[in-house]
Image (spheres, grey):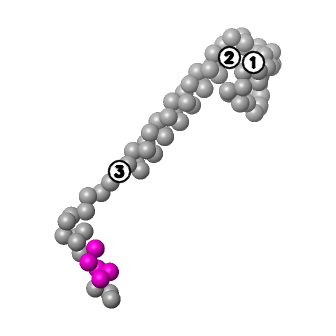
Amino acid sequence: MNRITIKLDLYEYKQVDANCRLISERLGLPQVEVESDLMELTTLLENYRDAQAEQGTRKTETRQTVPADEAVFAAAEPDQQD
């Protein structure tokens, strides 16, 4: 199996196009299919990033409810140290 390693910015069209041609020539694949696969990869990565960001947002929005008697004790505790 042939292997090509490249560093690619998926948002830079000229770079994607040039690398698609290179991959197409070296591996004997249709350029249109390589471009299509890279576009699908980009979409999947964006969806993954958005899902991860949404999960992070949910975690930071999670709040714990403190029972009232504990809240009063916690507020009164510093005064008792004086």
Residue 64 in sight from this viewpoint? yes
Q: Is residue 46 above or below residue 25?
A: below
Secondary structure category for the residue under label 3? loop
The numbered mark at residue 67 is none
Residue at the image position 55 percent from the left and 30 percent from the top: 46
The range drawn in magenta is: 74-79
Characterize the magenta stretch by its predominant secondary structure. Answer: helix
Q: Position of residue 10 (x, y in %)?
A: 68, 27
- In depth, the one of 33 and 15 nearer the eye is 15
Work out which quarter of the rendered image holds the N terminus and state it.
Answer: top right
- In depth, the one of 17 and 54 nearer the eye is 54
Can residue 76 be found in the magenta stretch? yes
Q: Is residue 46 above or below residue 73?
A: above
The numbered mark at residue 17 is 1
Three-letter code for the amino acid on which mark 2 is drawn: Glu
Q: Which residue is mark 2?
A: 35
Mark 2 vs 1: CB contact within 8 A: yes
Q: Which numbered disc, 2 or 1, marks the residue that appears first in the sequence? A: 1
Secondary structure category for the residue under label 2? helix
Q: How many marks?
A: 3
23 left or right of 53?
Answer: right
Three-letter code for the amino acid on which mark 1 is drawn: Asp
Q: Which residue is mark 3?
A: 62
Other-residue count near label 1 (Cα within 10 Å), few / some / many at <14 / 14–19 / ≥20: some
Mark 1 vs 3: CB contact within 8 A: no
